[in-house]
Amino acid sequence: MNPQFETLNEFFAMGGHALYVWLAYGSTIGVLLGNFFMLRSAKKRQLRELKWSARVAAEELATENE
Amino acid sequence: MSLKELWHKLGSPRWFYQMSSPWVTAFGFAAALLLVIGVIWGLVYAPQDYQQGNSFRIMYVHVPAAMVAQSVYIGMGVAGFVLFVWRMKLADVAIAACLPFGVMLTTLALFTGGVWGRPTWGTWWEWDGRTVSTLVLLFLFIGIYALREAIVDVELRGRASALLAMVGTINIPVIKYSVEWWNTLHQPASFTISEKPTMPPEMWLPLLVMVLGIYCYAAHNIMSRMRIEILQRESRTQWVRNLFVVDKVSGT
């Protein structure tokens, strides 16, 4: 199995189809990465909220017991 | 664990939340590995197509996106059936989690299809059987999403989206056979399970890696979205509270 391109310039040029190849790969990789990080931040945000509400509930319980 | 036990356990979102954690991680790593290998293989090592030259490399992102988008829809249709017949809560969670991913992947399939169509057919868009039925797939995903946003009542929302998800599966065979029924621009399937590939292995192996990678990413993404959805819905229950208590008061 050998690389299909002799030089890096040749690789970027994609035999004249650079625009299409890089647009397709760029959009796919960009959207997948964006999707991944958006979901991760949503998860973190939810974790923070749930931790906060758990602490509030615990404090309420503690003051009730006093 | 027997199938019957598994079926019974799937009724419990709590059980799903607990057992899915290692799977999410495993599918995430598998997806990252497969996709990195697949992209490099497809971009650098796969041979050029004798007719299309290098624009043919777009296949390695276009075909997996389109294939997995349809699979996600089928999965959602099955979840719709389960929800409709057995009223399983987890199925409703699954429908909700499939929608954003389905919209994203179908949009990508249409976009990369257009980008591939331009150098190959000479046009960004053509009202051809496959492009139109894939557009219908996108509208189905968006439609069910909008429907769920519009209905406040949880029970009704579940049943309405389950019904639409089931009815919409009619579109899947239409997409599949569109290239045979309306023989216009779109090329026939690059990849089928039943037949020997017409491409040499140097060309279809990277495609297989990419398809598996996107499937793993779909599993990772949909499962983690389901976990977020479960925590959201069950946030007032004791088991969710206990997950986040810093110093545990009771042992439940």
Image (tube, coloured by chain):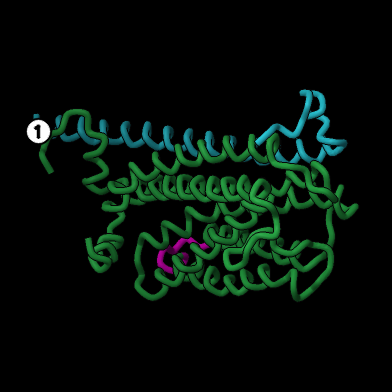
Chain colours: A cyan, B green
Q: In which quarter of the image is residue B136?
A: bottom right
- Between residue B146 and residue B190, name the one nearer to us: B190
- Between residue A44 and residue B175, name the one nearer to us: B175
Q: How crowded is mark 1: few (under 14 residues within 10 Å), some or many (20 or more)?
A: few
Residue at 27% in and 66% down = B3
In the rendered view, would you say B163 is above or below B41? below
- Between residue B195 and residue B1, name the one nearer to us: B195
Tally of numbered discs: 1
* Residue B196 visible in rendering: yes
Q: In which quarter of the image is residue A17?
A: top right
Magenta span: helix, strand or loop, mainly? helix
Q: Along the horizontal axis of the image, is B76 left or right of B46? A: left
Residue at 33% in and 43% down = B21
Residue at 48% in and 45% down = B221
Give the extent of the magenta segment: B150-157
Rendered-image quadrant of the N terminus of chain B: bottom left
* Residue B104 visible in rendering: no
Rendered-image quadrant of the C terminus of chain B: top left
Residue at 69% in and 58% down = B190
The residue labelled by disc 1 is: A65
Which percent across, then down, holds residue B98? 51, 55
Which percent across, then down, holds residue B247? 17, 28
- Between residue B53 and residue B210, name the one nearer to us: B53
Which percent across, then down, holds residue B147? 56, 63
Amino acid under label 1? Answer: Asn
Q: Does B114 appear in magenta?
A: no
Chain assignment, label 1: A
In the rendered view, would you say B89 is above or below B247? below
Residue furthest toward the front? A1
**What is the secondary structure assignment of the residue under circle 1?**
helix
